[in-house]
Image: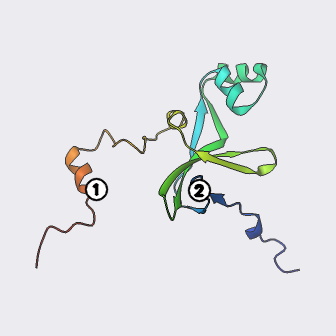
Amino acid sequence: MPGKRSKRNKVQHFYCPYCEHRLWRLGSPKHFLFYLGAAEIKQNVGMSSKSAALLAARGDYLDNNSWIEDFFCRDHGKLWMKITRKDGGKLVSAMATSIDWRQTTRTIMPHSPNPSVSEFTYRMSRQSGVRYYEK
């Protein structure tokens, strides 16, 4: 019985929301989402009000079933997708919104520059293919 332990056929593929081509994972870290209040926990995780209130009383709730991850589309380039693990292990993807970015830990919005990087460094990093010297 060859391939009995192989998990290769169980790998789930994700597709671009714009062009329906397959997305490729870039190996970026998973940025898990967290929720502050009982209302947010109840709405996003889907648990009862009582359980959500108990979790909210402990402090921030880190959701291990929802995260933001970096993908690549051959037509649209780099895309940030919100991945959610549903019951049964099935993964569902959607484009990450600005609200999702605010609910992650230690992340910087990808559409705005990093505030700790100088303007000169940011400009130079955008010109990685340009050569200023001649032989």
- Screen quadrant of the C terminus: bottom left
Q: Quadrant of residue 46?
A: top right
Counting from the top left corner in percent of width and height, residue 72 is at 52, 60
* Left/right of residue 64 with respect to residue 49 in the rendered view: left
Classify mark 2: residues with Cα within 10 Å, few (<14), some (14-19) or many (20+): many
Q: Which residue is mark 1?
A: 126
Q: Residue 64, labelled with which disc?
A: none
Nearer the observer: mark 2 or 1; the answer is 2
Amino acid at the residue labelled 1: Arg
Q: Quadrant of residue 36?
A: top right
* Closer to the camera in the image, 113 or 65: 113
Counting from the top left corner in percent of width and height, residue 56 is at 66, 22
Q: Identify the residue at the far front of this view.
A: 19
Q: CA distance from mark 2 to mark 1?
A: 25 Å
Above or below: residue 29 compared with residue 74: above
Circle nearer the N terminus (2, 1): 2
* Left/right of residue 70 with respect to residue 50 in the rendered view: left
Number of callouts? 2
Q: Identify the residue at the far right of this view.
A: 1
* Closer to the camera in the image, 16 or 53: 16
Q: Which residue is mark 2?
A: 16
* Left/right of residue 8 with respect to residue 73 in the rendered view: right
Residue drawn at x 67%, y 21% is 39
